[in-house]
Image: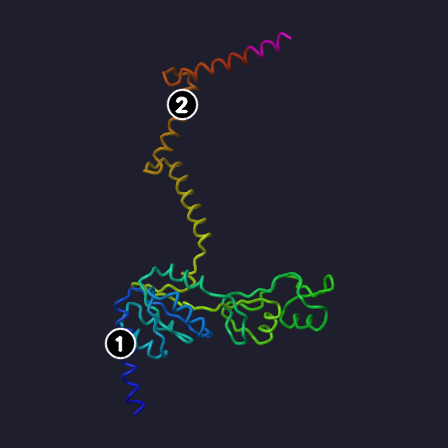
Amino acid sequence: MKTTKAAPEKKKVVKKILDLGKQYPIIGILNMESLPASSLLQMKKQLRGKVELVMTRKTLIQKGLKDLKLENGEQLVQQVKGMPALMFTKDNPFALFRTLKKSKTPAAAKAGQLAPRDIIVPKGPTPFTPGPVISEFAQLGIKAGVEGGKVAVKEDTTVVKEGKPINDKLASMLQRLGITPMEIGLDLVCVYEKGIIYPKSVLDVDEKKFMSDLTGAAGGAFNLAIDIGWAAKDTIDTLLSKAFREAKAVALEGGVLSPELTEDVLAKAYREAQTVAEEGKLQVQ
């Protein structure tokens, strides 16, 4: 009887995925692993009206995505990992990722979790007094010594690389040092839009660096356009000013008289006359 009852429920979930997949142009794959129920409830409130969430078994999510017959759909199915959920939205993928990222809160690492990024124990003093902790640091590959009566880390040390598991000894040490490398929140694995799959490494844009790079590129393009004399809406005023200055310099050098240059030519002649007069006085003396 359980199997008979379960079958319609499974079909209902898959149909919901199909309906939402046709209604919304953007599909996000989430990993809900290690996400507390309280945090999930809070995130649902923040995202209400912006996204539709589907939380169900991995096999049903995979079937729903396959039945959508999306372009590059097989690659999308391969991204379904951990404790997955689907998110359907019409929001810009990058704006959506930024919203989810800002909502995350730092958390201590637990044994067995994968490092979300390279985890570094920074150089400097620790709260520990000299003792066995120095050998504990050594076991973790961290160089430490005694400075000012406290144990100090001698140099920045990467204790685990991104994507690698955190062992129990390291998790304990990080917690004692007050280092919270994990984040609590919805983990957006990737986003699908019109056949393109954006992994979180692409979605996670450093906005300040992006704007700096964009400004630098625009400045470089403008300078290149001026150098080669490329006339466009944004360069024409500068090009005309440059051409006028260069033409004026040539005319002054050749002593060409024109209404626009009379004052400059006379000023140049006056300066040259003064120079000659000064040199004459020096020779007489």
Position of residue 71 relative to residue 233, above or below, is below
Q: Residues within 10 Å of mark 1 (few under 14, many from 20)?
A: some
- Rendering coords of residue 275 (x, y %): 54, 14
Q: Is residue 12 left or right of residue 166?
A: left
Q: What is the tally of numbered marks visible in this picture? A: 2
- Upstream in sequence: badge 2 or badge 1: 1
- Rendering coords of residue 254 (x, y %): 42, 18
Identify the main secondary structure in magenta.
helix
Q: Determine the image quadrant of residue 142.
A: bottom right
Magenta region includes residue 279: yes
Foreground pick, 69 / 282: 69
In the rendered view of the protein, which quadrant contains the C terminus?
Answer: top right
Q: Determine the image quadrant of residue 222.
A: top left
Q: Amino acid at mark 1?
A: Lys
- Rendering coords of residue 207 (x, y %): 44, 54
Query: Which residue is the extreme one toward the right?
Result: 149
According to the picture, the residue beneath numbered tag 1 turns out to be 15
Magenta region includes residue 144: no
Query: Which residue is the extreme one toward the bottom?
Result: 1
How was the colour assigned to the protein in this rendering? rainbow
Q: Is residue 43 left or right of residue 133?
A: left
Position of residue 252 relative to residue 113, above or below, is above
Position of residue 223 relative to residue 153, above or below, is above
Magenta range is: 277-285
Callout 2: helix, strand or loop?
Answer: helix
Q: Determine the image quadrant of residue 63.
A: bottom left
According to the picture, the residue beneath numbered tag 2 turns out to be 248
**Residues at marks 2 and 1, CA–CA distance in whole angstroms:** 76 Å
Q: Amino acid at mark 2?
A: Lys
**Residue at 38% across, 37% down:** 228
